[in-house]
Amino acid sequence: MTDPTDYFGDACYQALAYWIMAALTNDPFTLARFAGLYKAVQSAGGAGSFGMDATSTPYLNELLASWIMMLVSFPLAGLVVYTIKETNYDTEHVDYADDVRKDSEAPRQPTSGSSDKVASE
């Protein structure tokens, strides 16, 4: 039977990771990339865990590997947390989905010096 505290620890770690990502930027496109990278690393870790189980790695080695990764990741996360500054919406550029949609629907204006003609072959 799985211990419920395992789920609580995992939830706390994920909440910290998502808070750090959200505190780094207000740009939704950058946040989406951060979340995708986080999920990719998380999936790779899950694959590594299943691989360790498939090769009958001793449980003590699995435990040591997870603790070493955690002990390395917390100080690195701490360095990132200490560099986070207070959000200031007046000085930061924030993209809103409605603004991006309006920009993509607007007809494109040719820039000066560019040609809209397609080169014939």
Image (spheres, rainbow, N blue to C red):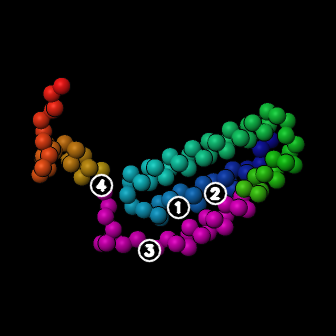
Does residue 86 sit above or below 31 in this rendering?
A: below
Upstream in sequence: badge 2 or badge 3? 2
Magenta-drawn segment: 70-96
In the rendering, at what x and y percent does residue 104 appear? 22, 44
Residue 71 colored magenta? Answer: yes
Upstream in sequence: badge 4 or badge 1? 1
**Which residue has dot 3 on it?**
86
Residue at 42 percent across and 62 percent down: it is: 25
In the rendering, at what x and y percent does residue 46 appear? 68, 41
- Between the residue at mark 4 and the residue at mark 2, the CA separation in whole angstroms equals 29 Å
Upstream in sequence: badge 4 or badge 3? 3
Give residue 1's quadrant in the image. Answer: top right
| Label 2 Cα crowd, 10 Å radius (few <14 / some 14-19 / many 20+) | some
**Which residue has dot 4 on it?**
96
Query: SS at mark 2?
Result: helix
Q: Which mark is residue 19?
A: 1
Q: Are marks 4 and 1 in contact (CB under 8 Å)?
A: no
Residue at 50 percent across and 46 percent down: it is: 36
- Between the residue at mark 1 and the residue at mark 2, the CA separation in whole angstroms equals 10 Å
